[in-house]
């Protein structure tokens, strides 16, 4: 699906400036990277929409259950729809978000989507605690995108930011249980999928 409707000319300029580095060669990803832990997922420094600096694996993923997607603020059609849909998922999961489950949205345009921009975006949708919107160095975001399985097998589509996958990565890091679902499934269907991956702790 095409991603159209950038909010402002400023966003469009940001996209144009970022398109070339977004299409980084796969050589940016270490070919023989370990399949698990900080060396695979990376421990890149990221900044949340609340301005908090964290290590991606150590502070956000290690020992946790996570729901992860990629967005950018200038994507005003599909990304907005995905964010609104995930707000409904957050509502259904209730207190599990922030205690048992962490929600993570990573900006594909981190140079434009500053913590201040992301905070306004999260506020517009009524995002509550337990859900982190992240920005960071573009090359490290690109590695995360590939390591988390959001790269397209078609290199032409993969290089087009407007073709990025509207998907949700669902992972139980301690058990290494991972799956991916369309992020625009009904909130009820997404929660059903999440519950199938996140087995009760006492049964893990």
Image: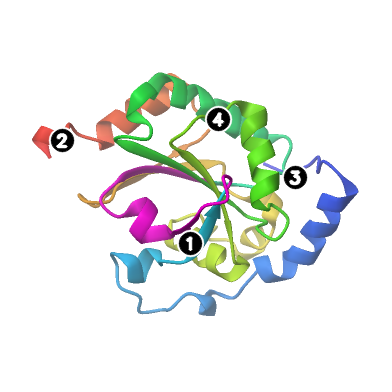
Q: CA distance from mark 3 to mark 1?
A: 20 Å
Dot placed on the residue nearer the N-terminal end, 1 or 2: 1
Q: Position of residue 127 (x, y in %)?
A: 55, 30
User: Which secondary structure, mark 4?
Assistant: loop
Front position among marks 4 and 3:
4
Q: Is 97 positioned to the left or the right of 153 in the image?
A: left
Q: Which residue is mark 1?
A: 144
Q: Quadrant of residue 98?
A: top left
Q: Which residue is mark 3?
A: 74
Q: Which residue is mark 2?
A: 201
Q: Which mark is residue 127?
A: 4
Dot placed on the residue nearer the N-terminal end, 4 or 3: 3
Q: CA distance from mark 4 to mark 1?
A: 23 Å
Q: From the viewer's perspective, is residue 50 above or below residue 110?
A: above
User: Which secondary structure, mark 2?
Assistant: helix
Q: Residues within 10 Å of mark 4 (few under 14, many from 20)?
A: many
Q: CA distance from mark 1 to mark 2?
A: 27 Å
Q: Residue furthest left?
A: 203
Segment tinted magenta in the rendering: 49-69
Dot placed on the residue nearer the N-terminal end, 2 or 4: 4
For the residues bearing labels 2 and 4, Cβ distance under 8 angstroms: no
Q: Residue at x 74, y 37 (%)?
A: 76
Membership of 13 in magenta stretch: no
User: Which secondary structure, mark 3?
Assistant: loop
Q: Residues within 10 Å of mark 1 (few under 14, many from 20)?
A: many
Q: CA distance from mark 2 to mark 4?
A: 26 Å
Front position among marks 4 and 1:
4
Q: Residue at x 27, y 37 (%)?
A: 197
């Amino acid at each position: 699906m095409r991603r159209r409707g950038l909010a402002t000319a400023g966003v469009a300029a940001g996209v144009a400036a970022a398109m070339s580095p977004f299409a980084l060669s796969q050589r940016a990803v270490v070919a023989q990277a370990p399949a698990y832990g900080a060396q695979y997922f990376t421990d890149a420094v990221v900044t949340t929409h609340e301005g908090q600096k964290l290590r991606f694996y150590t502070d956000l993923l290690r020992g946790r259950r996570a729901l992860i997607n990629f967005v950018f603020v200038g994507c005003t059609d599909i990304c907005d729809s995905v964010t609104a849909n995930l707000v409904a998922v957050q509502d259904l999961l209730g207190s599990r978000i922030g205690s048992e489950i962490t929600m993570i949205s990573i900006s594909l345009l981190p140079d434009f989507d500053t913590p201040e921009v992301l905070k306004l975006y999260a506020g517009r949708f009524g995002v509550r605690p337990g859900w982190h919107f992240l920005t960071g160095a573009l090359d490290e975001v690109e590695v995360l995108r590939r390591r988390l399985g959001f790269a397209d097998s078609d290199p032409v589509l993969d290089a087009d930011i407007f073709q990025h996958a509207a998907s949700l990565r669902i992972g139980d890091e301690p058990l290494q249980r991972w799956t991916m679902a369309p992020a625009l499934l009904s909130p009820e269907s997404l929660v059903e999928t999440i519950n199938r991956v996140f087995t009760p702790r006492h049964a893990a």
